[in-house]
Image (cartoon, rainbow, N blue to C red):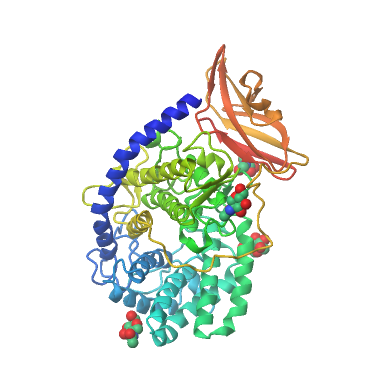
Amino acid sequence: MLLSSTLCALLAVGKAWGQSSTVDAYVASQSPLAKAGLLANIGPSGSKSMGAKSGIVVASPSSVNPDYLYTWTRDSAVVFQVLVDQFTLGIDTSTRGEIDNYVASQVIIQQVSNPSGTITTGGLGEPKFNIDETAFTGAWGRPQRDGPALRSTALITWANFLISESNTSYVTNTLWPLIQNDLNYVAQNWNQSTFDLWEEVDSSSFFTTAIQHRSLRQGVQLANALGQTSVVSSWSTQAGNLLCFLQSYWNTAGYITANTGGGRSGKDANTVLASIHTFDAAAGCDALTFQPCSDVALSNLLTYVNAFRSIYSINSGLANNVAAATGRYPEDSYMGGNPWYLTTLAVSEQLYDSLIIWNQQKFLNVTSLSLPFFQLFDASVTVGTYTSTSTTFTTLTSGVKTFADGFVATVAEHTPSSGSLSEQYSKSDGSQLSAADLTWSYAATLTSFDARAGVIPASWGAKGLTSSCSISTGGGGGGSSSGTVSVTFNVDATTVFGENIYICGSVDALQNWDPDTALILSAANYPIWSTTVNLPANTQVQYKYIRKFGSSLTWESDPNDVINTPSGGSFIENDTWR
Ligand SMILES: *[C@@H]1O[C@H](CO)[C@@H](O)[C@H](O)[C@H]1NC(C)=O
Ligand SMILES: *[C@@H]1O[C@H](CO)[C@@H](O)[C@H](O)[C@H]1NC(C)=O
Ligand SMILES: *[C@@H]1O[C@H](CO)[C@@H](O)[C@H](O)[C@H]1NC(C)=O
Ligand SMILES: *[C@@H]1O[C@H](CO)[C@@H](O)[C@H](O)[C@H]1NC(C)=O
């Protein structure tokens, strides 16, 4: 096992060379194409915006199968967040006219009565509008309560810049009313159910909660700066409640459950997108706000990425420390259930954001929770703090950089020479699928590239927050154990007659990694193999399944599986043989 890890590491180093120059070249050629693709979808001057009104972003010019020729509040805000960030950071100051048009369009859109209500009765939660700024009245998954939060965040970023330019009157007269409408909506409605960002599950949703929290924190800062103090107490209180609620999405199996409803595994790009859309470099690797380099967010990233390794054939044969194509969530069946550009790019961006912080703070922490993630890059790494002068820091950060570049290289491999990016690419042959020229695909390209270049977006106030609801992840040590938990392991494994599945792992109850005494699983529900074991509570347990046939024995591929056991009761772990 050691030998093969060492070989993998050597191969990864060899690959890094080729890959980082491939990615450098892709970034250089794709950056202007992505920017042009994004601007082409903004009306009325955009070449593909098909008659959209001024400042209106079309989700995609595709009008059939699927018809995305609408303007979504979420997608538009994500797009303008990129333009505002690039403008205010001096990366591209050519888009002021577009930003002004967006503001003017949202003054109109906010007032449009629609099936979710009027501006005062819930209409701000309406997910999409016609591109002539009239209401879309067909059936839809509504409301979607992330829209007002994302829009206010983009507008506040713009407002802060204008204040720094002494243009406070425009902020007070034009931006503040829009922001106040959105944030009053967030403060009043965050605790109501919502459709998730994929417009499918009606429950509570991590992405929505995370960006709602961010928006209110940022709103409080702006309100104070403008002397609009009447909203401060309500927004601050609700921000605290949101931060508390945010913790409840943590799953003791080591990842963030994306939605409280939906009946799925909960492994979802929703959570990775939330981490990058709430990145605040001032907060370092803060776990309370799920910062990109926090142990909770890294453990989540690993779980999310691994969920796609066995279900997309374009990922077959890739080792676990090599990037893979990722999609929205493993159970996805929309348009056949394929990888998306924006989700694959989101993984790279979370990793680039992490590298920014580790290089800035000049150390990184490996906790028991993030250990399996870091072991991808150094099989022998242990829990601890590594300063930038250590070889471990160098090994880990260069491994993460190669891994991150691999996600961009995956996108590059499936980008045509025109640079056009649709919504999805095929899980079997990588060809483009679903809506052509998805505006968000271009936005995701630009933000990933900026993060790779070390660009740090403005802070929003994540630093130094506290909450009595903070989760216990067993980070740092190995967790204290008191009592046991009954854990049922289910693994989906196809076998031949005479072959059996076993489990062993890092604790006594799992035979301390001894394959000879590993526990046999029952095939009563074949192809699900199953066993129930009492494990220590509040403990991180690593394990693997083994296949035995006669005298031959096959381990699952690396890395080790991991669960963090809950404090009591019982727990069902569902795995697929690797
Ligand atoms: C303030 O910003 C707005 C929006 O870009 C612009 O229209 C206006 O001319 C600016 N005012 C001043 C005084 O710079
Ligand atoms: C409302 O907040 C409470 C307390 O945090 C939480 O238990 C509940 O799930 C929330 N409901 C929704 C729909 O957000
Ligand atoms: C890093 O880990 C050490 C213990 O190893 C802990 O004392 C310290 O607070 C951690 N720092 C951060 C920023 O998480
Ligand atoms: C495993 O699946 C069962 C339903 O078959 C579910 O109750 C359980 O919550 C799942 N476990 C995890 C960790 O998602």
Q: Is residue 77 above or below residue 357?
A: below
Total marks placed: 0
Horizontal and vertical percent for residue 341?
Answer: 36, 50
Identify the residue at the far right of this view: 483
Q: Is residue 447 above or below residue 528?
A: below
Work out whether residue 527 or residue 304 is closer to the camera in this orientation and state it: 304
Quarter assignment of residue 67: bottom left
Q: Is residue 67 above or below residue 151?
A: above
Horizontal and vertical percent for residue 173?
Answer: 42, 87
Identify the residue at the far front of this view: 389
Work out whether residue 434 or residue 46 is closer to the camera in this orientation and state it: 46
Q: What residue do we see at 59% from left, 65% from top?
A: 464
Whether residue 337 is visible:
no
Whether residue 203 is visible:
yes
Q: What residue do we see at 56% from left, 62% from top?
A: 209
Q: What residue do we see at 37% from left, 77% from top?
A: 103
Horizontal and vertical percent for residue 201?
Answer: 53, 55
Work out whether residue 313 or residue 93 is closer to the camera in this orientation and state it: 93
Q: Is residue 222 above or below residue 508?
A: below
Quarter assignment of residue 240: bottom right
Horizontal and vertical percent for residue 46?
Answer: 24, 67
Q: What residue do we see at 50% from left, 81% from top?
A: 225
User: Is 424 left, or right, of 182 in this rendering?
Assistant: left
